[in-house]
């Protein structure tokens, strides 16, 4: 009787795959969680505290995404009675729901010292440094919420600072300039739900895979394309803008630009991140300092854009250098491709008298 011979197949690749590399297959298993833990391993001193915070933001994002998608079914669209927030703006029911979700998810984490939200007048102080409060998290729970009833993309923006032990007791520790952020990001609830994150080492993008309930990595080290002739601004207010901005608008009209404006900062900045161009919210008669909020809108978006090779200014000042004086302070915003932002700021610093050279044609579109 002949012995049967078992031929062993060549062993599969034994090298561990690099978990930080995206895989564009059906089985993308590099989740946000995997990615954060892999990043953490690069820092032997890491305690895991920071990863806990990002995981709670991710949990909040999934929950809010679900609420946004079911809002019409659950009848939670529309404004919340006559309530207005600290800015005197009408609160949507979902503004309040999203705010509560974030407070619950982050409030459960023992290392969060302070939570501050667009929807709350004062920050919520949970614990001090001695009690383990190591981070301050600031957020806009549902940016662009006035668009909710019309299924336009809306999102959550967040900013994370260390609870700065060097500060004197009477200085609120969440009021730090944007360059001190240790992480920033946003979750966009659009045609898909995405999570865009920076921890100061580039920008990564994850898409929520509803079938497994996880954000999966789809793009790393995103770079804002340059030479894109797109400007994004609420042009209906043009006559209220300072003359230098009006001059920039005249310049783009004469030089073959396209205009794109959604009216949700998260969606407009996301497009700018991937397609290039510039997003602006200049000072207006109604909002002389600009409309957008420094601490939980402009700062985190500026960090994302800068980490992706773009720039972000308030007038001619770098947004991340602004020393904050109040939680809800407003700022003007110019952010996007470095060359197009420079084009705008050149108009600002040269007044109305000088018009820069027209831009060169843009190269083929980059895809992510
Ligand atoms: P919100 O935080 O109350 O939603 O307001 C901020 C929004 C931004 O998303 C957007 O860029 C801007 O307001 C749009 O304002 P406008 O309607 O004046 O163009
Ligand atoms: Mg907002």
Image (cartoon, grey):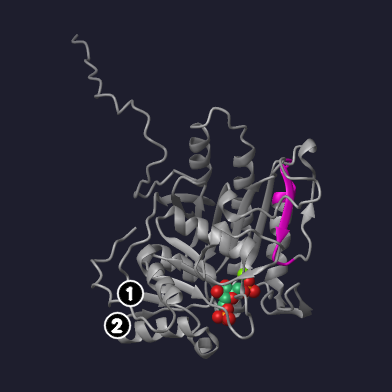
Task: Say if residue 123 shows up in the picture.
Answer: yes
From the viewer's perspective, tell me whether residue 360 is left or right of residue 192.
left
The numbered disc on residue 229 is 1
Where does residue 336 sit, x and y in percent of width and height? 43, 66
Mark 2 highlights which residue?
A: 255
Label 2: which secondary element: loop
Q: Quadrant of the N terminus?
A: top left
Task: Give whichever of 106, 361 is nearer the camera.
Answer: 361
Proximity of marks 1 and 2: CB atoms separated by less than 8 Å: yes
Ligand 2 visible in quadrant: bottom right
Quadrant of residue 222 within the rendered picture: bottom left
Instruction: Tell me how far mark 1 sits from mark 2, CA to CA.
Output: 9 Å
Where does residue 8 sit, x and y in percent of width and height? 25, 20
Q: Please report the bounds of the magenta region as a residue range.
A: 106-119
Where does residue 272 sit, x and y in percent of width and height? 42, 67
Give the residue at x 38% y 64%.
337
């Amino acid at each position: 009787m002949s012995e049967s011979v078992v031929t062993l197949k060549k062993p599969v690749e034994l090298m561990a795959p690099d978990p930080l590399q995206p895989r564009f297959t059906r089985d993308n298993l590099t989740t946000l969680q995997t990615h954060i833990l892999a990043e953490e391993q690069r820092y032997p001193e890491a305690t895991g505290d920071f990863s806990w915070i990002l995981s709670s933001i991710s949990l909040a994002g999934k929950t809010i995404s679900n609420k946004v998608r079911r809002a019409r079914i659950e009848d939670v669209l529309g404004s919340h009675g006559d309530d207005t927030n600290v800015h005197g703006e009408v609160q949507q029911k979902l503004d309040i729901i999203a705010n509560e979700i974030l407070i619950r998810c982050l409030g459960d984490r023992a290392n969060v010292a302070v939570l501050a939200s667009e929807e709350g007048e004062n920050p919520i102080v949970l614990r001090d440094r001695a009690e383990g409060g190591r981070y301050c998290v600031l957020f806009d729970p549902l940016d662009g919420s006035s668009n909710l009833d019309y299924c336009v993309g809306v999102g959550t923006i967040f900013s994370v600072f260390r609870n700065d032990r060097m500060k004197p007791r009477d200085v609120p520790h969440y009021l730090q300039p944007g360059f001190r952020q240790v992480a920033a990001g946003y979750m966009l609830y659009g045609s898909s739900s995405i999570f865009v994150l920076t921890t100061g080492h580039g920008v990564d993008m994850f898409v929520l895979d509803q079938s497994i309930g996880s954000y999966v990595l789809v793009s790393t080290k995103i770079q804002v394309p340059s030479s894109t002739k797109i400007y994004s601004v609420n042009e209906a207010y043009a006559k209220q803008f300072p003359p230098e901005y009006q001059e920039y608008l005249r310049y783009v009209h004469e030089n073959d630009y396209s205009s794109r404006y959604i009216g949700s900062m998260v969606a407009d900045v996301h497009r700018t991140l991937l397609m290039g161009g510039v997003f602006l919210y200049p000072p207006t008669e109604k909002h002389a300092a600009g409309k957008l909020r420094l601490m939980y809108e402009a700062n985190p978006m500026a960090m994302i854009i800068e980490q992706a090779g773009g720039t972000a200014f308030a007038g001619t000042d770098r947004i991340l250098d602004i020393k904050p004086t109040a939680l809800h302070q407003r700022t003007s915003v110019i952010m996007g491709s470095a060359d197009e932002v420079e084009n705008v700021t050149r108009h600002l610093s040269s007044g109305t008298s000088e018009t820069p050279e027209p831009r060169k044609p843009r190269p083929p579109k980059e895809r992510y």
